[in-house]
Amino acid sequence: MSSKEKYTVILPTYNERRNLPIITWLLHRTFTENKLDWEIIIVDDGSPDGTLQVAQQLQNFYGSRIVLKPRAGKLGLGTAYVHGLKYATGSFVIIMDADFSHHPKFIAPMIEKQKTGDYDIVTGTRYSGDGGVYGWDLKRKLVSRGANLFADTVLRPGVSDLTGSFRLYKRAVLESAIARTESKGYTFQMELMVRAKGMGYRVAEVPISFVDRVYGESKLGGDEIVEYAKGVLNLWLKV
């Protein structure tokens, strides 16, 4: 896979000091292996754990591909995406979590899917194909599934995972949909998708595995941990 398109990842962070180097390294690997142009915009909301300092060290290593746009306090996920979007230079924007709920390995299939039908949005779904959720108890799975089914029935957007937050957008599409989205918190992702569908944008889905937040390495396979450890040592030697 190769493309002249540029992909911007917007990563809102709050207390992600331990996860940020790994997710950045995995994103770098994904884009490099697929010969894609990329940048990561890190929107840190005043993390007290030193996330911003780690982000600055990553910027020293990866250079201009890491763009830091921190804010003074915790202002909500929706506004973090609005803030990050102002600085995006890619023709496509990927929004995802920084805590390994979303593995960067799903980005390549999302990009492939987008190209097959020139879709405006490709959303990762936990609820179709071989998608799934790991690390949640039955109650939480039922609540999430129920919330999605309820929203799908009421809103009829025709997507199986409305509350998911791992998506690839054409930048212009995200800009126009986000301008009409009013919610700032948990329902932001849902409203954004419903508005985009209401505006006539075409949406495709790619099955993803969602893994509940666990710090860093435990979400990765053994080989990746070894490879990552080498990469980190290399990185800290150079920074």
Image (tube, rainbow, N blue to C red):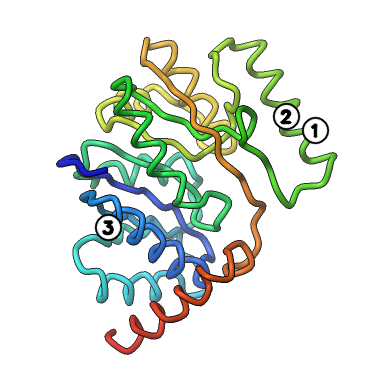
Confirm or deny contact between disc 2 and disc 1 (CB under 8 A).
Answer: yes
Q: Mark 3 and mark 1 in contact (Cβ < 8 Å)?
A: no
Q: Residue 190: where, in percent of width, then height?
A: 55, 27
Q: Which one is closest to the eye, mark 2 or mark 3?
A: 3
- Amino acid type assigned to the residue bearing label 2 in the image: Arg
Image position of 141 with respect to 70: above or below: above
Tag 3: residue type? Thr
Q: Residues within 10 Å of mark 3 (few under 14, many from 20)?
A: few
Separation of marks 2 and 3 at Cα, in angstroms = 35 Å
Of the two numbered discs 1 and 3 on the same chain, state the one appearing first in sequence.
Answer: 3
Q: Position of residue 55 (x, y in %)?
A: 36, 70
Which quarter of the image is occupied by the N terminus? Answer: top left
SS category of the residue bearing label 3? helix
Q: Is residue 37 left or right of residue 133?
A: left
Give the position of the C terminus as an image quadrant: bottom left
Tell me the mark number nearer the camera, choosing from 1 and 3. Answer: 3
Q: Is residue 139 left or right of residue 192?
A: right
Q: Position of residue 181 (x, y in %)?
A: 43, 25
Q: Is residue 201 above or below residue 215?
A: above
Type of residue at label 1? Leu
Dot 2: element = helix
Label placed on residue 145: 2
Locate residue 7: give its quadrant: top left
Task: Tell which residue pokes out farthest to the left in this image.
Answer: 4
Q: Earlier in the sequence, mark 2 or mark 3?
A: 3
Depicted 193 relative to depicted 84: above or below: above
As measured in the structure, the alpha-carbon distance from the residue carrying label 2 to the one carrying label 1 is: 5 Å
Query: 99 and 209: which one is in front?
Result: 209
- The tag on residue 32 is 3
